[in-house]
Image: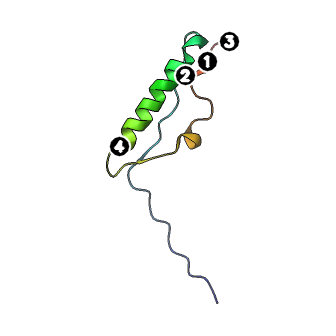
């Protein structure tokens, strides 16, 4: 028997919360990560909005862009 493949449905309204770039001192990374968590949590409460998992969009949270 041949399997019937269904067409992929578009995701609809979706959003990825991307990490911040820490331009200051690395001691502020916990605050930066906290803000990122707060934003991710807040937007996930919006009805009919799919929020991309943080692990899928966050390779290096609040990384320092210094030399």
Q: Earlier in the sequence, mark 1 or mark 4?
A: 4
Quarter of the picture holding the N terminus: bottom right
Would you name the residue on which mark 3 appears? 67
Residue underneath mark 1:
64
Decide which of tag 3 and tag 4 comes sooner along the chain. 4
Q: CA distance from mark 1 to mark 4?
A: 29 Å
Query: Which residue matches tag 2?
Result: 21
Pointer 1: residues within 10 angstroms few (<14), some, or many (20+)? some
Q: Position of residue 41 (x, y in %)?
A: 41, 37
Q: Secondary structure at mark 3?
A: loop
What is the secondary structure assignment of the residue under circle 1? Answer: strand
State how far apart marks 2 and 4 are (Cα). 25 Å
**In front: 10, or 52?**
52
Image height of 35 relative to 10, above or below: above
Mark 3 vs mark 2: which is more N-terminal? 2
Residue at coordinates 50% horizontally, 21% vertically from top-left?
32
Q: How far apart in space, not on screen, are marks 3 and 4 (Cα)?
A: 38 Å
């Amino acid at each position: 028997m041949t399997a019937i493949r269904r067409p992929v449905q578009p995701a609809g309204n979706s959003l990825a919360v991307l990490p911040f770039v820490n331009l200051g001192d690395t001691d502020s990374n916990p605050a930066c990560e906290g803000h990122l968590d707060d934003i991710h949590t807040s937007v996930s409460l919006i009805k009919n909005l799919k929020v991309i998992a943080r692990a899928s969009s966050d390779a290096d949270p609040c990384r320092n862009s210094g030399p």
